Image (cartoon, rainbow, N blue to C red):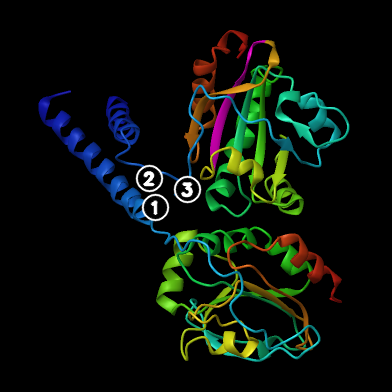
Amino acid sequence: MRIVTFLLTLFLVGAQSGICLGLEASENPEARPLAVGMPFPSFALHGNLTKSGRAYLGLPGAGPYSLDQIKAKVVIVEVFSMYCPHCQNEAPVANELHALLKSRKLDKNMKLIGLGAGNSEFEVKVFAEKYEVEFPLFEDPDFVAHKLMGQVGTPFFYVLVADPGHAGFRVTDTYLGRLPTARRFLDRVISVTKTGKEAKP
Amino acid sequence: MNTRRLWATALLGLTLCVSVQALAQEDARFQGSIYQVGTLKPVDSVLKVRVGDPAPDFTLPTIQGTTVSLAEFKGKKNVVLSFVPAAWTPVCSGQWPGYNIVREMFEATDTALIGLSVDNVPTLFAWVKQMGGLWFTVASDFYPHGRTAEAYGILRSTGEAERSLFLIDKQGIIRYLDVHDINSRPDLGALIKAMRSLPK
C-alpha cells in the first residue's frame, strides 16, 4: 500500500510540475486572454435555449441575452469549438462539472455556460446532442464574442465573479486546456471565488 | 521499509514518470506545430464544374494504404469531397475533427466522405494521427500534383487546393458545392442540409 502511495505521489508531483503531462488544447498564437481582475465584456449571447436552460440562468423568454442578465454570483464560461478534438474529449468532464455544481447545491449562485467559438447554431446543436450537454451553450459563428474574450485557445475556462450591485462580471480565474478533473477544478473555483461556504457536499 | 526496497520503489516510480513523460513529450511536440499562414486571397482559382455537372473521376492513394476512386461509389453511395488547402495549417486542422463527430449523419444519408489535400501520404498520415484519427477516407492529390483539384478547377496558383466541398449523388452528378473563403471554415449545417435533400 505504501509503495502504491509513494508511486502515485511521485507521479503526481511530476505531473503537477508540468513535466509529465502535455497541455491538451487547441492553441491560438493570437490569443490574448483577459487578465484576472479585468471586467468581462458584456456581449450578446445567442442561443436556442430550452425552457430549463433559460430557467437555470434566470433569463427571459427570447434572446439574444447578455451575460449581465444571468442571475448568479459566479459564472464559469467554457470557450469551446465543435471542431476542437480536445473540446470533444473534454465534454464529459464539463458535464461532470455541471452535475457536481448541482449535487453540491452550488448551482443557484454558480452557473456554467459554453460558448462555441466560430460555431453556428447547427454546430452548437450537434455538439450538445453528441455529448448530451445539459448546461446552456451559445453560438458565436463570426467569432465576435471570441475576439472580445481575447481569441483564446480551446477549451478555455473563464471564471467570472459578479461585481457588487450586479454591474457586470470580472475575470477571477482562467484555465487553458482540458481540466484535470471536474472535482479539482471546482475546488479551485471555490477557492478563488470564496464560494465554498455555500457548498453542502 | 528497508533502504533497498525504498530505492527500488523510487527507481520504479521514476521509470513510470519518465515513461509517461516520453509519451507526453511526443504529444507536446505537436504543440505549436501548426504553421501560421496569415490571411490569404479568399479564392484563387477558376471553378471548372457546376451543380448538375458529372463529377470528374479520380483514383488516389489514401493514408489507409489503399486507393480510392469516385467511380467505385456510383450507384451505391452519395459522396462528399472535402478538399482542404494544406496539412498542419490552422483552419484545416480545425475542420475535419468536426466531421469526425457526425459520422451518423453521413451514414443516415447514405453518404461517403472523402477528405483530400495536395499533401503527400506520409504528411497526411502524420497529421491525421495528430488529430486522434478520423473515421473517413483521406486521399492524397499529391502526384501528379493537384491533378484532381485541377480537374475541378480548385487548384490555387500557389499549388494548394481551395477549401471546398462537393456533394455528388449516386449517379455521379454534383448536387451541391461550396468553394469557400480559404480563411474560414464552411458551416456544417449547409452541407448536412444538402445531404438530407438527396434521395437515399
Q: Is residue A97 magenta?
A: no
| Image-based side of A9 in relation to B87, left or right | left
In terms of depth relative to the viewer, which is nearer, B86 or B61? B86
Q: Chain of mark 2?
A: A
**In what element is the residue under mark 2?**
loop
Residue A179, image x, y percentages: 50, 36
Please tell me whether residue B54 is drawn above or below residue A118 in the rendered image: below
- Check residue B31 in the rendering and tell me which mark sits there, or answer none: 1
Location of the N terminus of chain B by quadrant is top left
Location of the C terminus of chain B by quadrant is bottom right
Residue at the disc numbered 3: A30
**In what element is the residue under mark 3?**
loop
Residue at (67, 46) in percent of width and height: A131
Residue A1, image quadrant: top left
Please tell me whether residue B118 is drawn above or below residue A136 in the rendered image: below
- Type of residue at label 3? Glu
Residue at (60, 36) in percent of width and height: A78
Residue range in magenta is A155-164
Query: Given this view, does label 2 or label 3 mark the residue nearer the observer?
Result: 3
Assess disc 3: are there few (<14), some (14-19) or many (≥20) residues with their C-alpha within 10 Å of its C-alpha: few
Query: Given this view, does label 2 or label 1 mark the residue nearer the observer?
Result: 1
- First-in-chain label (2 vs 3): 2
Assess disc 2: are there few (<14), some (14-19) or many (≥20) residues with their C-alpha within 10 Å of its C-alpha: many
Q: Please indicate, yes or no, whether residue A132 appears anywhere in the rendered image.
A: no
- Check residue A22 in the rendering and tell me which mark sits there, or answer none: 2
Q: Please indicate, yes or no, whether residue A89 appears anywhere in the rendered image.
A: yes
